[in-house]
Image: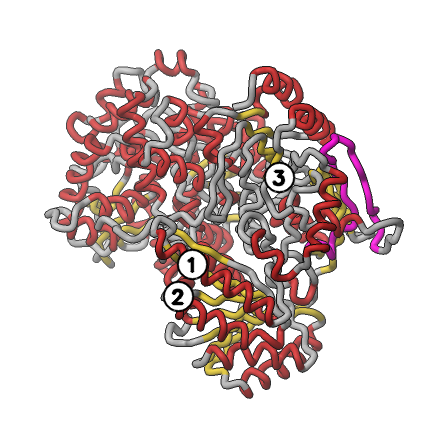
Amino acid sequence: MLNTEVKTELIQIVGAAGYLDRPEELACYSYDAFVEEALPDAVIFPKTTDEVSKILKTAGRYKIPVTGRGAGTSVCGAPIPVRHGIVLCFSKMDKIIEVNTRDRYIIVQPGVVNADIQKALSPFGFFYPPDPGSMNSSTIGGNIAQNAGGPRCLKYGVTVDYVLGLEVVLASGDIIRFGSKNIKDVTGYKLSSLFCGSEGTLGIITEAILKVLPKPEAVKTLMVTFDDLDNTARAVTDIIGSGILPAAMELMDQLTLNAIEDSANLGLDRNAQGALLIEIDGVKEACDKEMKKIIEKLKENGAVHIQEAGSDIERDKLWTARRSAYGVFAKLAPDIVSEDVTVPVSKVPEMIRRIIEITERYGLRVGVLAHAGDGNMHPMIPADKGNIEEWQRVEKAFSEIFKAAADLDGTLSGEHGIGLAKSAYLPLVMNQSTINFMKKIKHAIDPDGILNPGKFV
Amino acid sequence: MKEKKLQNCGKCGLCLNACPVYKILKEEQVSPRAKLHLIKAHDQNTIASSAFLKEIISKCLMCGSCSAVCPSGIDHYSKFMEMRRKMGEAHGEAPAIKSLIYLLAREYRTGFGAGLARTGQKLVPAGLAKKFKLGNIPIKNFPELNPVPFRKAHDEVIFPKGKPAGRVIYFTGCATNYLYEDTGDAVIGILTHMGYEVVIPKTQTCCSIPLLFHGAKDRAMENITANIKALRDIEAEAVLVDCSTCGEALKNEYPRLFEPHDEHLVAAQDIALRVTDIISFINLHFDLLQFDPDITGKIPVTYHAPCHTRNTFSSHLTVEKILQAMPSVDYRQTPDSDQCCGGGGTFFYEYPEVSKKMVDKKIESAKAVEVSHWLTDCPVCRMNLAGNTEKKDGLTVLHPVTLIHAALKQI
C-alpha cells in the first residue's frame, strides 16, 4: 500500500471511487493472460488526460512505478506490475470521441474495446483491420502499446499501420500530441512507431486517431484439412509465393484442431494432421478468381477436404473457434505458454519441423497454431508450473525455439510483445548497440524509470 | 454427474466483455476471471475471507454468460455457488435474502402462498419492502399475487379437445404459480390448442435455483428431490418450463448435484434430457398452430432475451423467428435485445445502482423502436423491466406465450 500522504494526493485527483487498494481488489490486477503475477500497491482509474498527467507528476515526485493496463489480456505479462506501485487502469476512460468515415478516421480514448470500435464503424460500412484474438475484450490502448496484430493483419498490416496520431502523457506529466487526422503526414519523426509496441515504458497513451477502411464487398472463408502437417505448411508458402494475398491464413495442427473441436463441436476431422482456415476478401469477382487459384494450390499440396463456409453464421463459428484456441488449451494443463516467434513465410515448414523436434526432445506436448501466411507462429505448450522439473524443460524448449527462429532470419515476437516473457532473449535478434539505443531513448524520456519498470528496456 | 474435468482458467479474458456486470462497472475484480482468481486465492489462503470478499463474489447475476463463452470449459456456476455458500456461512446474508430463502425452502412443505398471504397480496413483506426499498423498483410496480396459486386453481391433468396428440409435463415454477397466472393460462391454452394433454404435477415445488445461488444448498436438496420424485414417473415426451431459469436448474444443475451412485442421479439425468423451454417446444410444433384469420392489424412488439434463455436453451433467436412468423405481430428488434437487464434473481435488490444502469439502457432502446408490448420469457426480467418502466412509457411487459395464445383461432 502507498503511504497516506501519496494516497491522499492521488485520491484528490481521481476521487475515492477511482482509487482501489484493498487486498481483494489488488489481487485482481496482479495478472494478465501470461503465467506470472505481481501485486500493485494501488489501482487507479483515470477518466481524463489531465488526471493522467497529474497522477504521473505525483508518481514521479515520489518515484512510484506506474504500469498501464486496459483489459489485462496481454499474453506476455506487459501489464503485470513486477515492481509494484500503481496500476493505471484505463477501462473506464472509454469514450469514442469521433467517427469520421468521410475522412477515414476514428478518434478514441484508450479504454475503448477493439470490438466496440468495429461496432461503431459497422453501420457506416467501415472497419478497423487489426483483430487480435482478444478483440472482444482488449482495449485499444493496450492494442497500441503492444502493437497488436491478428489473423487479418496478413493482408492489412498491424496496429502501427493504423495509428494516425496519438496523445501521450510522458513520465514528467507533460502531454504530447503527434500525427494528425491525415492519412499522409511526414511532419517530423514518425513518433507513433516509437510508442506502438513501447509496452507502456515510454509514455501513457490517452487518445488515439486511427485509420479505418471500407469493408470489403465480399468475404469467402475456407476450412481445409490435410493428412500431413508438412503439406499443410507447404500449401501456405505456395499460395503466398504465387502472389495471392489472402486476408488471413491460419494453420492448426492435430492437437489444436482437437482441442478446438472439443469445445466448439464444429464437425472438424479429428484425424487430420493439419488444417488451414483461409479467408479472402475484396471485390466479388476478384475473390472468385483468387479462390480458384487457392484451391488449385491446396490440391497440389494434397489437401484432403476443402469446405467453404456457407453462411455468415458458419463463418463466425469458425472464427470464434479459432479465437478461442488459446483458452481451450487451458483444459489440457494447469498452465499454458503461448509464444509467437515469427519467420519469413517461406521458412514456415522448416520452423514447424523444428518446433516439433525440439518439444519432442524435451518430452513436451505442443500445439502448433500459426497465422501462417505471415510466418507468425503460436506454438502452445500446456504444462504445470508447479512441476519444477517439467517447467524447466518448458523453458529450455522455448529458449531453443527462439534460437531456431533467429537462425531462420525470424524474430522473437510477431504480435504479443516482449513483456516479461522474452526480455532475456533480445540479444538473439538485436546487437548490444541496438539494445543500448533503446535504453538511451527510455532514459531520455523517463530518467527515473517509473513507467512499467522491470520489462524489456 | 459431478464433473471432475480440469477446470483451469487460462485468464484469457474472453469472459470480460460477456459479463453484464463487468460491462457496467469496468473493474476487473467483478469479472468472472477475477472471481475465479479470488476463489483460488481464498482456497490457497492467500486472500482471507471477509465481508468485502463476499460482496465481490455476490456481485454476479449468475447469468451463465461467462461459461457460455469460456473456451476452457469452466463450470462457473458450481464454483460460484460453492463460494457463495462459504461466504454466506461465514458472513451471513442480508435479512431480505434470508427471508426469501426461508420462504422458498418452505415452499415444498407449507406452500409459499401461505407465507405470502399474510403480507397482503404483495410479493415481499410490506415491512421489509418499505425498509429496504427493494433495489430500484418502486413497490407499487411489483406484481400482485395470483388470487389463487396457479397449480391450486388447475386440475392435475388437462385434456385437449379430441384425442390427445401427445402428453407433456408442465413445470410451472414459482412465478407462474404465485404471480403470473396469465403466463400459465397461455401455456395451457397453446398446448391444448396443439392437441397436447398437459400434466401439472401437484407435488412439484420451487426449482431451488435461488437457494443454490445464495449458497443454501442443503435447504435446496429437499425441494430438488421432491421435484425429481414428482417428475420422474410420469410418461411424457417433454418437461416444459416457461421460465428459463427453472429450465437451467432442471437441465443443467440437478444432474450435477448428485454423486455418481446416488439413487436420484439417473432420474435427474432422464428428466434433464426431457426438459425444454416452452418457446422451443412451440417452434418444434409450429405447424400445429392455427392463427385466427379474423385478427386484423399488427401489434408492434419487441423482445428482451433473458440470460438463461440465451445461455441454456439458445432459444432467443427462436422467439424472434416465431414473432416474425406471426400474422398479428409487427416485430421490431432492438440492437441490445440480447443484453442482460440487470434483474438477475435478487441482483436488482442487492446492487440497485448497477442494475439500474443496465435496465435504463434497455428501456431507452425499447422506447426507441416505438412498441406497445415488450416480451420476455423470464419472470425476473419481466418484474425488472415492468417495475422500472413508467406508465407514460406505454410498454406492457408480457411473456411471449400470452401474445401467441391471443393470436390463436378458437377450436
**The disc numbered 2 marks a residue on which chain?**
A
**The disc numbered 1 marks a residue on which chain?**
A
Foreground mark, 3 or 2, reads 2
Q: Which residues are magenta?
A: A159-183
Q: In the image, what residue type sits under mark 2?
A: Tyr
Q: Identify the residue shown where x is 44% and y is 41%.
A: B33
* Residue located beneath label 1 in the image: A394
Marks 3 and 1, how far apart at CA: 26 Å
Q: Is disc 3 in contact with disc 1, using a CB cutoff of under 8 Å?
A: no
* Residue located beneath label 3 in the image: A452
- Comes first in the chain, label 2 or label 1: 2
Marks 2 and 1, how far apart at CA: 8 Å
Circle 1: element type: helix
- Comes first in the chain, label 3 or label 1: 1
Circle 2: element type: loop
Residue B343 located left or right of residue A55: left
Marks 3 and 2, how far apart at CA: 34 Å
Q: Identify the residue shown where x is 36% and y is 36%.
A: B39
Residue B81 located left or right of residue A23: left
Q: Is disc 2 in contact with disc 1, using a CB cutoff of under 8 Å?
A: yes
**In this orientation, which residue lies closer to the viewer: A371 or B204?**
A371
Q: Is residue B252 visible?
A: yes
Circle 3: element type: loop
Up/down of B118 relative to B175, above or below: above
Q: In the image, what residue type sits under mark 1?
A: Val
Task: Assess whether residue A172 is covered by the magenta stretch.
Answer: yes
Residue A362 badge: 2
Residue B390 spot, x, y in % from top left: 54, 25
Up/down of A184 relative to B171, above or below: below
**In this orientation, which residue lies closer to the viewer: A149 or A454?**
A454
The crowding category of the residue bearing disc 3, from other C-alpha atoms within 10 Å (few below 14, some 14 to 19, many at least 20), is many
